[in-house]
Image (tube, rainbow, N blue to C red):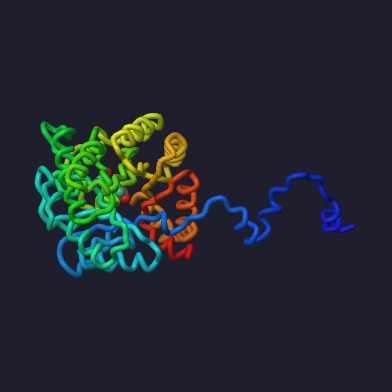
Amino acid sequence: MSSTDTHTRTALTLTRRMRRLRQSETIRAMVRETRLTPDMFILPLFVCEGEGVRREVSSMPGVYQLSVDEAVKETAAARGDGVKSVLLFGLPDRKDDIGSAAYDPEAPVQSAIRAIKRETPDVLVVTDVCLCEYTDHGHCGIVIDNEIVNDPTVEQLVRAAVSHAAAGADIVAPSDMMDGRVAAIRGALDERGFEKVAIMSYAAKYYSVFYGPFRDAAQSTPKFGDRRSHQMDPANAREALREVEQDIDEGADIVMVKPALPYLDVITRVKDAFGYPTAAYQVSGEYAMIKAAARNGWLDEPRAMMECLTAIHRAGADIIITYYARDAARAIA
Ligand code: PBG
């Protein structure tokens, strides 16, 4: 008797054979628990001054600093791929110690909001509200005696958020991690008749090394010190729940966990605890790691991209902010 005969004749009696449902793509697709759709993606865009500018960020291949006209084109192209939301970051030429370009109505972000709303009115425009791209020292707030001071910073953030709303933003997304900024922004928006503008708060934003490439893109590396005094300690998860609870109490409509992949447990806990629309940001370093490995031939990029995005959604994220938004939308089309 050959060994093949032995094997075909030997059958265990098993009530459960998990492999029955893995036999073909049709059956695997039928029992698949998590599915990505382009509706959940938000594409970040870095908007700079000038015209016809499309400058690749060296540490983020495929990501560009774009002038307003180019940002409009990129948004339309993303729309064509099925991505209906963008998140705008501004790169002003002029920076000062209080980040006043953050609320300049003619600055790149405000101009881009108006232009995108004109050309692609159905695209949802989200704006990053922070000072780090606007201060000459690169900090997220006003610095007094080497301290990033909370309350005066909140006043500046409020000005920025109001100016984004006035330009036509649908959602403002404070990423600074100052205390009390959600309530202050909500109050100011309502006072000025922008009660329909939603707030997506970077609620559990960690002090992460994975923001490195973003700082090349946004030219926002702090000139001294770091962001530990306001961003969360990566070791803490229970504290994330308190951060999120506070932002919800202050009026956040959507809460975010950031970064995504190293904090899947936090995404799950936040989603389970509050059941709020939960966003996760697959940050620059997460993107750059996949890109770099793929360029070395060490990882299959499309599969790595889809596996990470699926995991982020499976963990509980309803919304994913990702530099891969267009690629992923095309991959699932
Ligand atoms: C702050 C901000 C940062 C990111 C988004 N908003 C950088 C930081 O906190 O240093 C990082 C996003 C990324 O890494 O992709 N305005």
Quadrant in which the N terminus is drawn: bottom right
Residue 88 in the image, given as x and y percentages of width and height:
26, 55
63 over 98 or under it: above or below: below
Is residue 195 or residue 78 the one in the foreground? 195
Residue 321 in the image, given as x and y percentages of width and height:
36, 52
Left or right? Give the position of 131 relative to 286.
left
What residue is shown at x 10% (from left), y 53% (from top)?
A: 94
Q: Is residue 55 visible?
A: no
Left or right? Give the position of 310 relative to 214.
right
Is residue 74 or residue 65 the one in the foreground? 74
Left or right? Give the position of 28 relative to 107.
right
Residue 29 in the image, given as x and y percentages of width and height:
60, 58
The total of numbered circles placed on residues is 0
Is residue 73 or residue 53 the one in the foreground? 73
What residue is shown at x 27% (from left), y 68% (from top)?
A: 73
Residue 282 in the image, given as x and y percentages of width and height:
38, 50
Q: Is residue 211 visible?
A: yes
What residue is shown at x 35% (from left), y 57% (from top)?
A: 323
Residue most extreme to the right: 1
175 over 239 or under it: above or below: below
